[in-house]
Amino acid sequence: MVTFMFGYVSHGARMVRVPVHQEGFHPVCLAIPGCIIDLVDEELRLALVDVAGVRRKVNVGLLDSDGPPACVGDWVLIHVGFAISRIDEEEAEATLSLLRGMGEDFEQELEELKASVIE
């Protein structure tokens, strides 16, 4: 039996599924857009973020060196429990639309997000 791994790359306005072994493809980690809905621990720099209906605490401390402190209503890219950059709402919605187009893979990512916890 042969097992293939697949990844996604941006191709214009859509995501395209490609085999990982395909020449020129370098797998990358996925960062998901979310909107800060509450700052829950100022000292630890934790915020409650909504990601496609899933609410999770994330650390927003990495944004502190990137301008004003994170605040409610900010859209951020989230990776492994950290907000890694700010984005505008239009970019967030466009990215979420592309991710939803990935179907089952995006749903699996959301399920993993639901299971993750930052205390």
Image (tube, rainbow, N blue to C red):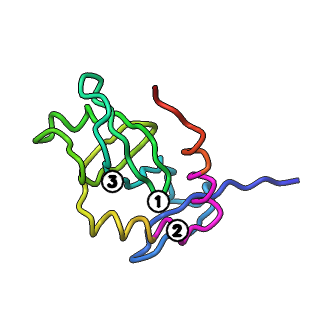
Examine the rendered structure and indicate whether residue 103 appears above or below residue 79.
below
Depth order, front residue of 44/102: 44
Q: Amino acid at mark 3?
A: Cys
State the residue lying farthest toward the bottom: 13
Q: Position of residue 37 (x, y in %)?
A: 32, 49
Q: Which residue was labeled with disc 3?
A: 35
Picture mark count? 3
| CA–CA distance in space, label 3 to label 2 | 17 Å
Q: Position of residue 88 (x, y in %)?
A: 23, 61
Q: Secondary structure at mark 2?
A: helix
Going 46% across and 70% down the picture, which residue do you hit? 98
Q: Amino acid at mark 2?
A: Arg
Q: Which residue was labeled with disc 1?
A: 52
Mark closer to the chain start, 3 or 2: 3
* Numbered disc in front, either 1 or 2: 1
Q: Report the magenta stretch's main SS.
A: helix
Mark closer to the chain start, 3 or 1: 3
Q: Crowdedness of circle 2 by 10 Å Cα count: few (<14), some, many (20+)?
A: some
CB-based contact (under 8 Å), mark 1 and mark 2: yes
Q: Amino acid at mark 1?
A: Ala
Rendering quarter of residue 65: top left
Q: Which residue was labeled with disc 2?
A: 100
The residues colored magenta run 98-110
| CA–CA distance in space, label 1 to label 2 | 9 Å
Mark closer to the chain start, 1 or 2: 1
Task: Tell me if residue 63 is in the magenta stretch.
Answer: no
| CA–CA distance in space, label 3 to label 1 | 9 Å
Examine the rendered structure and indicate whether residue 72 appears above or below residue 119.
below
